[in-house]
Image (cartoon, helix red, strand yellow):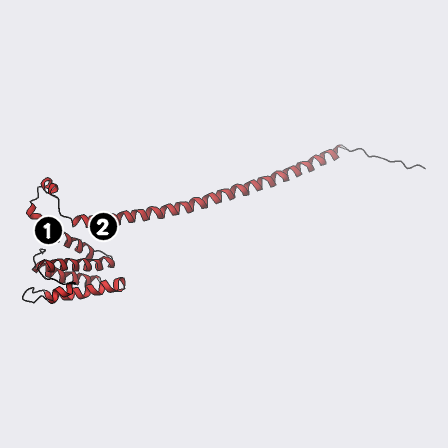
Amino acid sequence: MPRTNTITPPTFDDFVEGEQTFIEIQDTSLTSTDAIQSIIFDSSWATLFTFSLILSLILGVGIIYSMLRIRQIRNAEARYYAQQPLSSIAQRVLGVDSAQTDDSDLYSRRWRVILEHVNSENANDWRQAILEADVLLDTAITNKGYTGESLGEKMKQIKRSDINTIDEAWEAHKIRNRVAHEGSNFEISHREAKRVVSLYEKVFVELQYIKR
């Protein structure tokens, strides 16, 4: 007998099951796409946030550094102009007598700068105060008529009858030499720095360069 091919027509339930399978496949596809987009989106924001954070830190450091440098420059300018004598125009504007702007007034301004250094909280400023005080001492000794290639040579010519505080000058000058030669390696306490500056002060008071 010849074989008979029988084809079973699809039922309504078959159509429903097929549609559900298609919907499930489509939902799975949409879910995968959303996940990929979410990963890409989150990754972009994370990169942007990291970049912004690094940039903000760099700018913050730059701003802080600039502020510190400006402060240092202003302090240096203040010290410089404090040592400069007033011009004739400034004297007339301020009503200052020219006799009040002699060398002693200049020394007083320089001495005030030295005191600012030694009264700071920075050890480097203490050393700077000693160095500047020694320069001022050299100027004072030179103005007294003593000559020599160094301050030490000039002070060797001085007798105690000429300057009563010559011993104090020598003691301060020896410590200054250690500061100059050893630099930041020379350890000095705040109390000792003030004591050394007070030795210079005694000499300047005797020479009438400053007043107590």
Residue beneath disc 2: 76
- Which residue is rendered at x = 10% and y = 52% of the image? 103
User: In which quadrant is the N terminus drawn?
Assistant: top right
* Image side of residue 2 versus residue 132, left or right: right
User: In which quadrant is the C terminus drawn?
Assistant: bottom left
- Which residue is rendered at x = 39% and y = 47% of the image? 58
Residue beneath disc 1: 105
Q: Gap in Å between the C-alphas at discs 1 and 2?
A: 20 Å
For the residue carrying disc 1, how many other residues have a C-alpha within 10 Å: few (<14), some (14-19), or many (20+)?
some
- Residue that protrudes farthest toward the right in the picture: 1
Residue 154 seen by the camera: yes
Query: Could you say where residue 182 lies in the image, as x and y percent from the top left?
Result: 25, 64
Residue 187 seen by the camera: no
197 relative to 1, above or below: below
* Quarter-of-image position of residue 157: bottom left
Marker count (numbered): 2
User: What is the secondary structure assignment of the residue under circle 1?
Assistant: helix
* Image side of residue 156 versus residue 53, left or right: left
For the residue carrying disc 2, how many other residues have a C-alpha within 10 Å: few (<14), some (14-19), or many (20+)?
few
Query: Could you say where residue 129 lies in the image, as x and y percent from the top left?
Result: 19, 58
* Quarter-of-image position of residue 180: bottom left
Q: Which numbered dot is residue 202?
A: none
Task: Give the mark, 1 or 2, whose residue is nearer the N terminus.
Answer: 2
Query: Could you say where residue 31 lies in the image, as x and y percent from the top left?
Result: 60, 40
Q: Amino acid at mark 1?
A: Asp
Q: Amino acid at mark 2?
A: Ala
